[in-house]
């Protein structure tokens, strides 16, 4: 039995012990904003927040989430309103195909939660575990910078 | 679902043994297909290999189960018996008289020869001749979303979501492979997680369709990243010898090239890639004497195919490198030498094709010259910092003689909104945004009132592929024409139009080229060479792009930045590197994509010239940014260390260890 909090909601679920966290989130919880690009911790598409820290859910077992608080992209918008980061990604054209976007936003959110005014180099470092093949990262960095400067 | 793939690069299949599969695990082979062929321009590739495999990772059989994990584990229990054959590793080896053959017809798939002016004589008149051998590696598209499809049956109709660049091509290839009528195949593009040319053909569509059709049950396939690396299309590796002759004043007088393009085991869009390679090889310059010989050759590797830039980056690397070296030797500013030879509207390109449309190369070069990044070159005192520039161009559209049109329908809804039907796919580059903007502007309604339906074989008309930097241009024009049609009889509530891409008036008697229209770029790089590691640290990139009028600035800049980043990867480390027919780099841990820390700030300035035939003055822009950043980077390195970098990706150790002046890396 797994008990954890997912996007603010208490979850209790019977799961096989070898189930990966990404499969639990996608298949059992239907949170398909968690993307799978490589299955081995290299691309960051499967990033979720684990007690506020970005982790690759493809290389974690679901049972490791026992007692933890997990946030996926679906938990970022509040009351149907996009978060500042989500809106900034749209405003800066930081989304092309969108496959990397959920992971990027979560990695950026984790950074801003800890360090609300990061330098550009810190931003680039914080998202360096998240690969994007479309944007060249510039618009993503610009979007994160814009949010950090607003606050 | 799971795919049984070849573990041999070249072998006869002598037996397939499925005896270890329990009865609830289903398998499918070539025998389950009505016609075992992937429909394409050249039809040499089977959907599933049956008598012979020609590359490591080639699909042989499909295993289906009620869970993905089960299918994968039982697919490993399928035994394939092989009779190994000697492998063909490089194009040059493939053309040797006693080389093993991939196909009975021989390993040479196609060749192209072009001569203009008098090359032999003109080289004799040159003040400076440079010639070198260049090598360009195999690059993977590395779209973030692995290939996927989901198919199901409803009565006689097979419906399928695909991750694709062309739903109508998917429809044709599925119908043919399964032997069912076209109208019984309904293809819809899912939200595509990147394509870059790699999803402009067969990836996994027929596999999912086959299982759904044969079982009547829904079938889903998603391949692993390793399978993407070993089993899907690639960018062509190229070996070329390039010779260029210059006059003292910097005039490009003659160019000759012999090039071998490695198309892997199957043709894919290889012949078209060789065409664009040859067309763009000389760069966006006037060169009166040109001789181009190109060969497209089969080897035992994953098939090479379309990839963003479509053959142009390979040739541009060689040409721009020699131009930069010539500028240095002749002591002419690298921007000046390009200005002097730049194509202008009405001039003839290296194949003799007329520049029939707007040409903004000189304007782009001027913008780079005035940029802060380039001005810093004159004040920089740090010997470990270097600057480099290159210029290039890329054609828009599918080329002469290739059907290149789009049909668009517009319907007014009862609430006054408009539905716009376009048969092209948005593969993530933002054509949907641009097309909705064009429709809104033309119909004089806000964007919220435009409902775009794209890429659905039932609900839209065939508009061809999202490829060739054509989608905004061709569909934008079709939207504008459909809007005009609507306004000519608004009471019907409907507008419809079909438009054609402009074709070149030059005739070379080869299908697919030349092109009528090009997009132009000039790109400059600033970098620091790490004296310890030999690794260049990119400090900034400034790009000037002329793609006609810009419809959406954010999308435009995003295309340029993304294209540059992809070619930074090509320069710094991406390489499939086959050894004995097996690729070394099958994972992101070893096939290294650039991260946000590897890519410097990229600034793009658009030179907005008005292209009279384009929608609101636009041309195509999705690919051109990939073409010349590599030679700009290597030229910056060559300005710091006296080397000749003639191959990609960079070998940092070699750069570091090179002691002699002028060493070739
Ligand atoms: S899917 Fe988890 S890191 Fe790539
Ligand atoms: S937007 Fe496509 S991978 Fe980032």
Image (cartoon, rainbow, N blue to C red):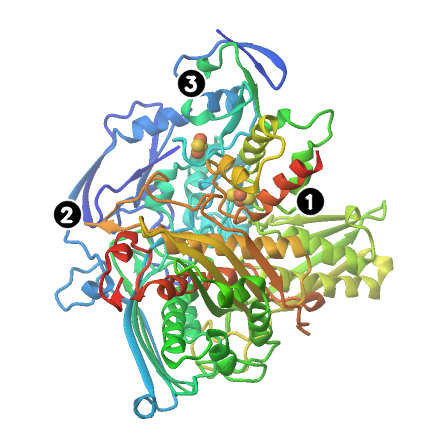
Q: Is residue B40 above or below residue B211?
A: below
Question: Could you give the CA–CA distance between mark 1 and mark 2, rounded to whole angstroms?
Answer: 56 Å
**Which numbered disc covers residue B84?**
2
Ligand 1 has an atom within 8 Å of the beta carbon of the residue at disc 3: no
Q: Quadrant of the N terminus of chain B?
A: top left
Q: Quadrant of the C terminus of chain B?
A: bottom left
Q: Is residue B192 visible?
A: no
Residue depth check, mark 2 versus mark 3: number of the one nearer the observer: 3
Task: Farthest residue to the left: give it.
Answer: B98
Measuring from the top left, give residue A112's x and y in whole percent: 60, 30
Residue under the point 36% across and 69% down: B318
| Subunit under mark 1 | A
Residue under the point 63% across and 31% down: A116
- For label 3, the residue is A61
- For label 1, the residue is A91
Residue under the point 46% across and 71% down: B512
Left or right of A40 on screen, residue B447: right
Residue depth check, mark 3 versus mark 1: number of the one nearer the observer: 1
């Amino acid at each position: 039995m797994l008990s954890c909090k997912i996007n603010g909601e208490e979850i209790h679920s019977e799961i096989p012990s070898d189930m990966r966290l990404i499969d639990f989130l996608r298949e059992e919880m239907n949170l398909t904003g968690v993307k799978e690009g490589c299955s081995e911790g290299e691309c960051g598409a499967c990033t979720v927040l684990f007690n506020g820290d970005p982790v690759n859910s493809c290389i974690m077992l679901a049972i490791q989430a026992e007692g933890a608080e997990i946030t996926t992209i679906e938990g970022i918008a509040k009351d149907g309103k996009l978060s500042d980061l989500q809106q900034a990604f749209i405003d800066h054209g930081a989304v092309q195909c969108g496959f990397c976007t959920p992971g990027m936003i979560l990695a950026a959110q984790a950074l801003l939660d800890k360090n609300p005014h990061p330098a550009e180099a810190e931003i680039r470092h914080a998202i360096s575990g998240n690969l994007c093949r479309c944007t060249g990262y510039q618009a993503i960095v610009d979007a994160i910078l814009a949010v950090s400067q607003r606050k | 679902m799971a795919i049984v793939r070849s573990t041999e690069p070249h072998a006869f299949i002598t037996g397939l043994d499925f005896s270890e599969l329990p009865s609830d695990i289903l398998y499918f082979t070539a025998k389950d297909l009505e016609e075992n062929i992937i429909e394409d321009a050249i039809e040499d590739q089977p959907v599933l290999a049956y008598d012979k495999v020609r590359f490591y990772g080639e699909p042989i059989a499909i295993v289906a189960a009620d869970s993905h994990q089960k299918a994968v584990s039982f697919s490993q229990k399928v035994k394939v018996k092989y009779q190994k054959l000697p492998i063909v590793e490089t194009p040059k080896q493939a053309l040797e008289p006693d080389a093993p053959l991939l196909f009975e017809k021989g390993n040479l798939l196609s060749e192209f020869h072009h001569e203009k002016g008098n090359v032999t004589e003109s080289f004799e008149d040159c003040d400076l001749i440079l010639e070198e051998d260049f090598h360009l590696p195999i690059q993977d598209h590395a779209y973030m979303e692995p290939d996927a499809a989901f198919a199901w049956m409803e009565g006689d109709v097979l419906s399928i979501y695909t991750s694709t660049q062309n739903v109508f091509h998917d429809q044709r290839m599925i119908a043919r492979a399964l032997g069912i009528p076209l109208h019984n195949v309904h293809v819809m593009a899912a939200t595509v997680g990147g394509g870059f040319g790699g999803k402009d053909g067969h990836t996994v569509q027929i596999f999912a369709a086959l299982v759904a059709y044969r079982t009547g049950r829904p079938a889903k396939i998603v391949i692993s990243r390793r399978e993407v690396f070993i089993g899907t299309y690639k960018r062509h590796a190229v070996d070329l010898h390039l010779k260029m002759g210059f006059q003292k004043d910097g005039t490009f007088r003659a160019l000759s090239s012999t090039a071998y393009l490695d198309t892997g085991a199957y043709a894919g869009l290889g012949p078209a890639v060789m065409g664009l390679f040859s067309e763009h090889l000389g760069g966006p310059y006037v060169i009166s004497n040109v001789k181009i010989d190109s060969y497209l050759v089969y080897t035992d590797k994953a098939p090479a195919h379309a990839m963003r830039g479509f053959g142009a980056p390979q040739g541009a690397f060689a040409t721009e490198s020699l131009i930069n070296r010539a500028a240095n030797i002749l002591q002419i500013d690298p921007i000046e030498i390009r200005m002097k030879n730049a194509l202008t509207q009405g001039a003839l390109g290296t194949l003799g094709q007329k520049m029939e449309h707007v040409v903004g190369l000189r304007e782009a070069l001027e913008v780079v010259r005035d940029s802060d990044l380039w001005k810093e070159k004159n004040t920089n005192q740090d010997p470990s910092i270097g600057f480099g520039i290159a210029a290039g161009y890329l054609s828009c559209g599918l080329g002469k003689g290739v059907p290149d049109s789009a049909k668009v329908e517009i319907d007014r809804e009862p609430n006054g909104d408009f539905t716009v039907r376009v048969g092209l796919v948005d593969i993530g580059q933002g054509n949907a945004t641009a097309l909705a903007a064009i429709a809104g502007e033309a119909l004089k309604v806000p964007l919220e009132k435009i409902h775009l339906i794209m890429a659905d074989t039932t609900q839209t008309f065939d508009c061809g592929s999202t490829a060739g930097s054509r989608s905004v241009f061709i569909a934008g024009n079709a939207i504008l024409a459909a809007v005009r049609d609507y306004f000519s009889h608004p009471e019907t509530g409907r507008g419809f139009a079909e438009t054609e891409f402009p074709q070149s008036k030059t005739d070379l008697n080869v299908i697919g080229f030349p092109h009528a229209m090009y997009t132009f770029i000039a790109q400059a790089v600033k970098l620091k060479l790490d004296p310890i590691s030999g690794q260049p640290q990119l400090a900034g990139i400034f790009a000037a792009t002329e793609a006609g009028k810009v419809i959406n600035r954010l999308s435009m800049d995003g295309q340029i930045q993304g294209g540059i980043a992809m070619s930074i990867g090509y320069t710094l480390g991406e390489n499939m590197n086959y050894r004995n027919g097996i690729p070394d780099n099958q994972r992101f841990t070893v096939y290294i994509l650039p991260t946000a820390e590897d890519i410097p700030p990229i600034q793009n300035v658009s030179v907005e010239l008005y292209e009279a035939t384009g929608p609101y003055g636009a041309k195509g822009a999705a690919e051109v940014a990939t073409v010349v950043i590599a030679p700009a980077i290597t030229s910056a390195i060559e300005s710091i260390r006296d080397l000749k970098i003639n191959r990609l990706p960079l070998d940092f150790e070699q750069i570091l260890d090179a002691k002699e002046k002028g060493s070739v890396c």
